[in-house]
Image (tube, grey):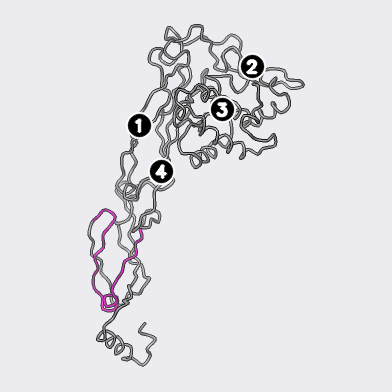
Amino acid sequence: MNKSPYEILGVQRDASDADIKKAYHKLVMKYHPDKNSGDKASEEKFKEINNAFDILRDSQKRAAYDRFGDTAFAGGNGAGAGFGGGNPFGNGDFHFNMGGGNGGGMEDILREAMRGFGFDGFGGGEGRASGNARTGRDLLDEVVIDLKDSYFGKKHTVKFSSNVKCEKCGGFGTDDGKQAPVCERCHGAGAVHAQKGFFTVEVPCPDCQGLGRKIKKKCSACEGLGAVHKQRTIDVEIPAGIEDGARLRLAGQGEAGALGAKNGDFYLDIRIRPDKKFTRLGSDLLIKENVPFTTLVLGGEIEIETIDDKKLSVKITAGTQIGEKLRVRGHGMPTVRRSGSFGDLYIEVVMPVPTKLNEKQKKILKDFADSKPDKKSWF
């Protein structure tokens, strides 16, 4: 590469991992192919950014680059080597390498990406070989639902673009639709050892780009990738009672693997927006309900509306205190782990204080206050 990975990402050589991630996220937002459709320059810049990040996010690759420069990745062994050049499936919306990568802390990176720019591509992941080919990358999306949606459950439809298995070659990337032979140089390992000064390092095989198999004649439909880019739709059933921060997993619904390897998984993070009326406490619910002073003193009933839009009559015992919590069993949230089980509903008693009284009302209250020697005990 002409520029150093530090120059490409616009960071100093002593930049922290957090600074590198932040710079990467910003550049990905700007140059992502989905935001620059048909712009070849942006597409090349996007690949360059991913290749640079692939080096700097990996402590071993970064150390090798700092010591040997571009020669550390000579012979096609750099971040750009491999399946598709650093970001083989880099034109979709949810390209997150969650579980198949070789770096630690990827889940933290994911959350930073989600907070930073929503669901845009998160390329740069090398993906580890599964057998002789890399498993497809996992995809991550996030949905914000109402508390009532959590109570009843709902179906959420996700529309996005990603790579899927090529139908013509069955995902093998070969012209005849058969699995490519094992690479003779690395014997299917996908990696070879190279001498770098005093060190012997393991690098992706330059003959097969780390895939472990050598395609002699590529499939014309996918150009040897084993996958093609398509628009996709996934329906996700969000179960009743799901809690804020939960993550759903759809096995095998992620990106297609390289050369017939298994697909990645699809993950959906659930966020629940606060409700104006109900406060959730685990499987229980809490509401605040205005109760007239006379009802608190003399007892009676009040009518409340539950989260499932039903009317419920609740008995108020004479002498109930302001701030007291009344428990109504079985009218809380569904319990995901125990089918048919519900939490409880707690009603916190509050009392509205009248601001406008006529003379008659004032006299009644004054007579009431004066009717007992210890006046403070009434209120």
- Which corner quadrant holds the N terminus? top right
Spatial CA distance of label 1 from label 4 is 15 Å
Instruction: Please name whichever residue, 291 or 346, is drawn nearer the observer in this view of the structure.
Output: 291
Horizontal side, residue 84 vs residue 254: left or right? right
Horizontal side, residue 162 vs residue 150: left or right? right
Badge 2 marks a residue whose secondary structure is strand
Q: Which residue is mark 1?
A: 234
**Mark 1 near mark 4, Cβ–Cβ under 8 Å?**
no
Badge 4 marks a residue whose secondary structure is strand
Closer to the eye: label 3 or 4: 3
Q: Which residue is mark 2?
A: 192
Q: Which residue is mark 3?
A: 50
N-term mark: 4 or 2: 2
Q: Quadrant of residue 63?
A: top right
Q: Which residues are magenta?
A: 285-309
Horizontal side, residue 69 vs residue 129: left or right? right
The residue sitting at the right extreme is: 198
Tell me the amino acid under the disc marked 1: Ile
Determine the residue positioned at 69% across, 17% down.
194
Q: Which residue is mark 4?
A: 270
Determine the residue positioned at 71% across, 24% down.
69
Tell me the amino acid under the disc marked 4: Ile
Q: Is residue 216 above or below residue 336?
A: above
Spatial CA distance of label 4 from label 2 is 42 Å
Tell me the amino acid under the disc marked 2: Val
Q: Quadrant of residue 240?
A: top left
Badge 1 marks a residue whose secondary structure is strand
Q: Is residue 240 above or below residue 197?
A: below
Closer to the eye: label 2 or 1: 1
